[in-house]
Image: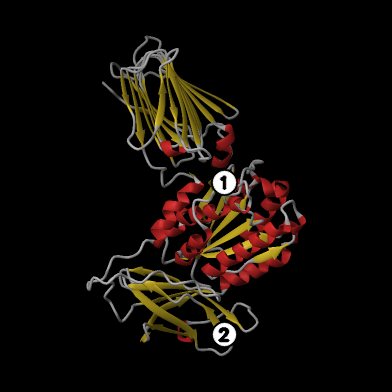
Amino acid sequence: MRRLCTLLLAGCALPASPWQAAFAAVLRVENASGSVSVRSVAAESLTVRRSCPVRENRDTDVSIRQAAGLVSVEAEPDDGARIDLEIDLPYRFELEVRSARGPVSVRGFPPRLELFAETGDIHLALPWAAMRLEAGAAEAPAELRLPAGIRFRQQRREGWSLHDRLPPGRTAYGTVRVRAAKPARLVLEDIPIPEDSPVKLPWQAAALVEELLRPPLAGPSGAPAPPAPAVSADGTVRFSADVRLVNLTVSVFDAQGRPALGLGAGDFEIREDGAPQSLAAAGAEEVPFNLALLLDLSGSTQRDRAAMKAAARRFIGIARPHDRVAVYAMANDLFQVVSPLTGDRERLERLIDAIPDVGGSSPLYDTLAVAYSQEFRRRPAERNALIILSDGIDNRLHEAGAPAAVPFPKLVRAVAAMNVVLYPVFLDPFTRVPPPAWARKAREQMEALARASGGRLFPARSLEDLEPVYELVAQELRSVYTLAYYPANQNFDGRWRRVEVKVRRPHLRVRARSGYFAR
């Protein structure tokens, strides 16, 4: 007689935005007799499903109370019957669970998990490389299962305890604290950080960059493909092969460095390995843009938080009606999604206004790779741009800074392989705390990253000094052209192909990379 009854808490007094949930929202669950199963999901509504295996559900089986930043769910049936709870928990919610006899399972990526249990099974499926763990019980579990490849430390002194052994200096997102009396079974299952999680760790950049730079397979002749080319000093063209179609994102400028507008397919000439190619499509103004803002909310920009929000709102305003905009942040040592790509400008502005006063260190360069992977990596044939509001001070520029996941030269090569144009809005820190040497290096490296992507760095003395920058960035976005052609050579064997792009109009130049791997 197990019948599920779903309570969708869409109208609850939850935080105004998912971002605020990282700091203000807690779900507290108590169940004295039944099971508790919680799963992290990409949703804005909290969903609770209840069931009773021995009778019909009753309205009094579960009570839900709400207060500022807190939702309490308690299974309290009048007759003591077993009530099982299944909960879909939005990302960024903290979780507290109290259980007596029923099994407890949690799967996902919560920022904090507090679990108090007397007996019963405990199953925690979490990304343990990003979680701190402190577990203790009066007696050791009758059965303990730990994931392979993840190290933990057990102690049997005055009871039993289990702790994580993450490397020193490792940035973690979540904390897990388990207290139990006599747990029957404790199972720790390792899962990857969910793809749809709005929070990522900077050290994930290492694997992402390796994937971007992974050499292609050898061709039919068995000869290895050549290494990735160096980035030219005058910019880049974005390339990606999609079955038999090659897509290029090209920036075109006149002799004075101003964006060239109004070009059509007949204005471009493309050669691949010296052979002329027929252009299938070219677009600029009519092609939608995916535009993301990356806000540096680390400690070095903390005094400019109000101005940072105002600048973000202005950059949202330069997007055209058919463009989509995302807002990301580097905050609390993490990459965080304020909003994914959307056309809802009013909601974006509300979310920006709701950003709390945060700080943290500056894993800026690693965060760039993670930001690209969040959405742009899955859109290789679209026009993508990332505007970065930052003073450019990365951890690695400090002698005592945390080591970077990706060496800077490798990051430059990876940026050249990304289908995104970078536009750093560089807040010149010469007037700030860091010494001038750091400021010079910060600017040089941000310029190198912009150049590798075909973008441009926009310097500013302060966030209040950005008025000329908004129109310049808007012109830059209008100068980016998407070109597509079907190569005459349809043997996509993974080999390197040299590509030249020219503009037939006089006094115009193209910032271009020299080719692509035909994968």
Check the image and report above or below for 413 versus 120: below
Foreground: 136 or 250?
A: 136
Q: Quadrant of residue 54?
A: top left
Asked whether, in this view, residue 92 is left or right of residue 426, the answer is left
Tell me residue 212's x, y (percent): 41, 60
Give the image quarter of residue 345.
bottom right
User: Disc 1 designates what residue?
Assistant: 402
* Residue 311 coordinates in the image, percent (x, y): 68, 56
> For the residue labelled by badge 1, is the local secondary structure a helix, a strand or a loop?
loop
Indicate whether 229 appears above or below 265. above
**For the point 63% across and 44% down, which residue is it?**
355
- Mark 2 Cα within 10 Å, few/some/many (few <14, many 20+)? some
Kindly identify which residue carries mark 2. Answer: 508
Q: Residue furthest right?
A: 431
User: Image quadrant of residue 15?
Assistant: top right
For the N terminus, the image quarter is top left
Residue 68 bears which disc, if any? none
Identify whether 387 is placed above or below 87: below
Percent x, y of residue 331: 59, 45
Residue type for callout 1? Ala
Residue at image coords 51%, 75%: 232
Q: Please state the horizontal and vertical placement of residue 449, each as a whole percent of the image.
A: 56, 64
User: Going by the image, does 512 lie left or right of 227?
Assistant: right
Q: Secondary structure at mark 2?
A: strand
Q: Are marks 2 and 1 in contact (CB under 8 Å)?
A: no
Question: What residue type is disc 2 on?
Answer: Leu
The numbered mark, 2 or 1, whose residue comes first in the sequence reads 1
Q: Is residue 102 visible?
A: yes
